[in-house]
Amino acid sequence: MNFPYQIKNLEQYQQEYKRSLDDPSGFWGDIAEHFTWKKKWDTVVQSDFHHADTRWFEGAQLNITENCLDRHLADRGDHTAILFEPNDPNKEVQKISYAELHKRVMEFAWVLKNNGVKKGDRVCIYMGMIPELAIAVLACARLGAVHSVIFGGFSAQSISDRIQDAQANCVITCDGANRGAKTIPLKSVIDDALVSCNTVNKVIVYDHIQTPVSMIKGRDAWWNEEVDKVQQSGNTYFPAESMDAEDLLFILYTSGSTGKPKGVVHTTAGYMVWAHYTFVNVFQYQPGQVHFCTADIGWITGHSYIVYGPLSAGATTLMFEGVPTWPDAGRFWEITDKHQVDILYTAPTAIRSLMGFGKEPLQGKDLSTLKVLGTVGEPINSEAWHWYDKEIGKEKTPIVDTWWQTETGGIMISNLAGVTPSKPTYATLPLPGIAPELVDENGNVIEGMDVSGNLCIAKPWPGMIRTTYGNHERCIETYFSAYKGKYFTGDGCLRDAEGMYRITGRVDDVLNVSGHRIGTAEVENAINMHEGVVESAIVGYPHDVKGQGIYAYVIFSGDSSNPDLLKADILQTVSRLIGPIAKPDKIQLVSGLPKTRSGKIMRRILRKIAEGESDKIGDTSTLLNPEVVDEILLNFI
Ligand code: WT7
């Protein structure tokens, strides 16, 4: 495959960028010509931000799996599509060629169909990071079912909420997943989740860790047995369903500043073009390279840069089942050496954690195949950036700091590896098609250089969120209402003298813990469910490894004679209701929370205290209860 739209130098970037904004239809129409369509589009883009109504390539028909699989068969059917590195380094590596992946996806699409899944149905996928997860995702797309992948760290309650919101009728899971020295009993979590979900009538279970599970008659079926049936039928070819450009491809739930997580909806054609275009340009992918994205497919990064981006480009995508620090902190480097990885894409939190182990884990590891390093998920601090550059990139490998969101579908602001300039801790420049704007609180656009403000995107791009599943109003309200006619990201941002962008973090009540997005309201609701808790407030504070830690202030009315037990109980409750990733790092029991006279919690004060900046609290005299601030400061942990 060649990529005529791959940008090769700074000047070309500037030209393409200009054209993308001056003539978006011409620009994206030309790029779209390089994909496989069943029918071409009538219009390239139509958009009305006031109603959150954007359509790309309307009138077109396609199937994304034909672009990720079928179109590669003739030229590179025998090339490795998925390179699977198991959790345990002593277990066997799997190499799945494009031809093999094509076959397995079609067989599994038959399994779904035979089990009653139809085009448009929602299928929930809750699996570990194994090839079957990618196969399940692609099989849904082959058949036209909408996948909703849920990260393995979410609890039964969270799964149940998501399944009910999506009204899914089928769940695909594993008996269990390996994560370092631990195993996670996925099927049993699903069983708990399904107690309260009456829409699900099929559960397909892949036997991965050979742990005993209970199977429900009529509802549960084994993956391998179902595939065997398809193979025995002799009819394994599964024609790719014809999808409209704007048909739903997937839902991915993500946290916001209020309420329950919302189902971010991505559709078929625009998402495909965006995931592919950003993959090829940001990482400067060259045919034959091995791309190692360390994210989990349960997050958007995995969707776009483990599955759809790399596969649409015919790349070898490395899937790693395990964790960076098991059996030791050299695991990423060992994998890089073993598989001669060309592109490594990971999160600042992983870099900071590995940095803490020093140089020893790097000893004897050949990292010389690396051509591009990437980071994603949170602002990268200078120390981590330089460590990554020096120890991993040997000061000669470009680092791309990629800013984007679940809602944006793909990378929005980033340097293009080796093509446009990088600047430590800066995401740098917008991709073609992306029109960033900084706005002040009143919605005025801040022009010029050396300025900061709230980051908005002023024009539609192919990978943008289309709706929040089942509640379009919520989409309008969350993203398109704060600043009329613009998409609001929720991030603060600065633009330096050269016009380079640096994302400074969320300006709403959303936390970013180890690159995982966590809504404060969600954690508070979970804590408040605990017997005896009157009220709670969650804020973030700087954490050396996680980026942000979770600080909980809790008013407790019950018996608190054993505070350690009580705190452990609260953590249990959060784990059960959301998942272990949302557990507070610190819990402080308080008798009250600082409130305004109208009863609103003054989070700013709580944040300052948690950040250790109590000298910056300011005037508390207008509070309803200024005395609690002193009490909180006295008992601060
Ligand atoms: C939030 C989105 C994008 C996939 C992973 C996270 C933060 C993301 C960067 C970056 C600074 C970043 C933002 C954003 N973020 N990338 N390179 N520099 N901040 O997706 O869970 O939707 O979270 O992650 O705050 O809004 P997500």
Image (cartoon, rainbow, N blue to C red):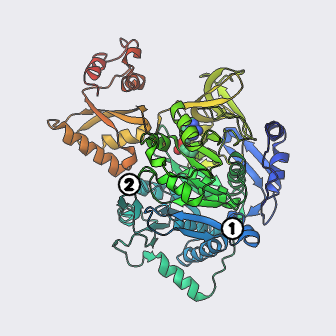
Disc 1 under 8 Å from ligand 1? The reply is no
The quadrant of the rendering that contains the C terminus is top left
Identified at 34% across, 22% down, the residue is 594
Mark 2 C-beta closer than 8 Å to ligand 1 = no
Q: Position of residue 274 (x, y in %)?
A: 70, 50
Looking at the image, is mark 1 or mark 2 earlier in the sequence? 1
Residue 202 is situated, as x and y percent measured from the top left of the image, at 46, 72
Residue 431 location in percent, x, y? 72, 40
- Which amino acid is tagged 2? Ser
Rendered residue at 40%/47% (across/down): 581
Other residues around mark 2 within 10 Å, as few (<14) / some (14–19) / many (≥20): many
| Horizontal relation, residue 393 to residue 157: left or right | right
Total number of numbered labels? 2
- Element marked by disc 1: helix
The percent position of residue 158, horizontal first and vertical second, equals: 41, 53
Q: Secondary structure at mark 2?
A: loop
Residue shown at the point (38%, 50%) measured from the top left = 579
* Residue underneath mark 1: 69
Mark linked to residue 155: 2
